[in-house]
Image (cartoon, rainbow, N blue to C red):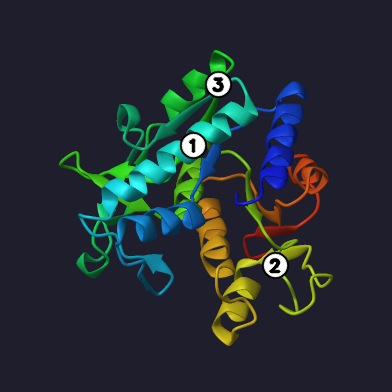
Amino acid sequence: MTDATARAGVAHAIQRARAEGQGIVVVHGGGPAIGQALAAAGIPNEFVEGRRVTTERALPVVEAALTLLGKQLAQEIGDAVALTGRDANLLTAEVIDPALGRVGQVTRVAATRLTGLQSIGLTPVIACLALDAEGAALNVNGDEAVGAVAGALEAPIVYLSDVPGVLDDPEQESSVLPRLTRGEAESRMADGRIAGGMIPKVRSALEALSQGATSARIADGRSETTVQDALRGSGGTLVVPDEA
């Protein structure tokens, strides 16, 4: 997301996947862009257990940064439309914890509106904002938003990261785990082998599977080739339910 060349590679991989007949929905966050925008506005950039604290003052800044980033991504992908969860009540959420401010967890996805866009040849590009029951905006974790969308669409999901997948040894990029069951994931998160920013991706993958996603893969988003491989069903780490 922060490297123009890498982002262009992702866009090209998506274009190729569409040419091969795949229907694509892109869900994105924008941590670095949000951090820069908050700093420019003189608003503290705070986190609690990996979640960004989003005050009433911060929320318009967060929304502006995500909206602009979505427009840029949609333009790079081509034949795409940038949306947030505000548009057509696409994503509905509820507040997680008042201590986090305007931060929500997705409770509903208007999936038919996404498939409707796909049916006319447009790729939805969704920024991770949602509406609460009163129609007010909420900031949503990007990994959790994409899990909810994939579950609602009963579709495979690919998480793009700045590492090649879930690593057996966090210090060795060559130690990618090709397959990870729910039980193995829970064990590794408990003992710290899966930590930091990988935790929300793994948890989201497990939740997406339970919600109806057909598969979940965590892959390297820094290279057009690795993104192409992931969209074709290889590379990275495939997260699966516990095996019988």
Read off the residue under disc 1: 70
Give me the residue at 56% from left, 20% from top.
122
The residue singled out by tag 3 in the image is 118
Residue shown at 30% from the left, 32% from the top: 89
**Considering the numbered disc 3 on the image, is that residue within a helix, a strand or a loop?**
helix
Left or right: 127 in relation to 202: left
Q: Where is residue 236 in the image (x, y as percent from the top left)?
A: 76, 57
- Please identify, in this view, whether the residue under mark 2 or under mark 1 is nearer the observer: 1
Q: Which of pointers 3 and 2 lies earlier in the amino acid sequence?
A: 3
Q: Residue at x 25, y 66 (%)?
A: 97
The amino acid pointed to by label 2 is Val
| Rendered position, 96 above or below 78 | below
Classed neighbour count for the residue bearing mark 1: other residues with Cα under 10 Å, few (<14), some (14–19), many (≥20): many
* Residue sticking out furthest to the left: 134
Give the residue pinned by disc 2. Answer: 166
Q: What element carries label 2?
A: loop
Foreground: disc 1 or disc 3: 1
